[in-house]
Image (cartoon, rainbow, N blue to C red):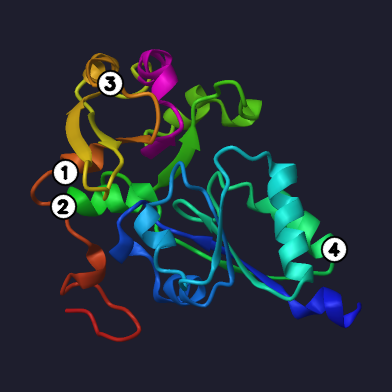
Amino acid sequence: MTSEQTAGRVWIVGAGPGAVDLVTVRALRAIEQAEVLIWTDSLVNPQLAALAPADCERIRTSTLTLEEVMALMLERARAGKRVVRLHDGDTCLYSALHEQLCRLLDADVEVEVVPGLSAYQATAAALRAELTIPGLVQTIVLSRAGGRTGVPETEALERLAALKASLCLYLSARHVAEVQAELLRHYPADTPVAIGYRVSWPDQWLTVVPLSEIARVSAERELIRTTLYVVSPALAPPGEARSRLYSASHDHLFRGGA
């Protein structure tokens, strides 16, 4: 490697669901030290971009292709700049992280990935809900409707719904009628579903409705993007459900049982 190639560095940073105070400390430090901020302006709160230094070059990506974004990242990194690529949500979910990493590492650019809070976590917190209730549900599935991109056959919605787990569906509002029809084959019609639009933003809209109503409610609100569905019996748990970990009768490494 040449010194020119190793002089710069790229941080791929999860910006969280929207609220400025829901970014991690590590993400905030990366933004505050950025010399170039390449950010998803269609999804990331502009107040986060404003936290970069005044002399930081800010590049919006809503009108750019991935190839154009990568060309900019590589050019600035090779020029020795501290480049922050700011994504909405968490870097491990629907962020094109893999494609970007491959190209950056192939070019011998040093990369650090900084995770972010995801919308499903912000939604559960806003509802004061736990998505894993003892004796009721212990699995969380993060997925999406097929849509234009499609999903592997082994991850078809019918297979995921058959688990009857806490199911969090991203990028699915345009297909909510088909989603509802499929889910009703596996979950009871009165299963609670949280519908969250721009969760943690100032214009957040969040409600819980029966599964049988999600298509109607989504259509009434004209939801087509930045919408998350959380399908889970945990949103209406029985009052006696509790964690065994904190039960007086449960023995573990740090506490003897009763």
Residue 196 horizontal/vertical position (percent): 27, 37
Q: Amino acid at mark 2?
A: Ala
- Depth check, mark 1 against mark 3: the one in front is 3
Q: Which residue is mark 1?
A: 237
Helix, strand or loop status at disc 2: loop
Residue 132 appears in the picture as rendered = no
Q: Amino acid at mark 1?
A: Pro
CA gap, disc 4 to disc 1? Answer: 51 Å
Tag 3 or tag 1, which sits nearer the N-term?
3
Residue located at (37% from left, 33% from top)? 164
CA gap, disc 2 to disc 1? Answer: 7 Å
Residue 16 appears in the picture as rendered = yes
Mark 1: few, some, or many residues within 10 Å (few <14, many ≥20)? some
Residue 189 horizontal/vertical position (percent): 24, 19
Q: Which residue is mark 2?
A: 241
Asked if residue 226 lies in the magenta stretch, the reply is: no
- Depth check, mark 4 against mark 3: the one in front is 4
Front-most of residues 122 and 27: 27
Residue contact at pointers 2 and 4, CB within 8 angstroms: no
CA gap, disc 4 to disc 3? Answer: 44 Å
Q: Which residue is mark 4?
A: 107
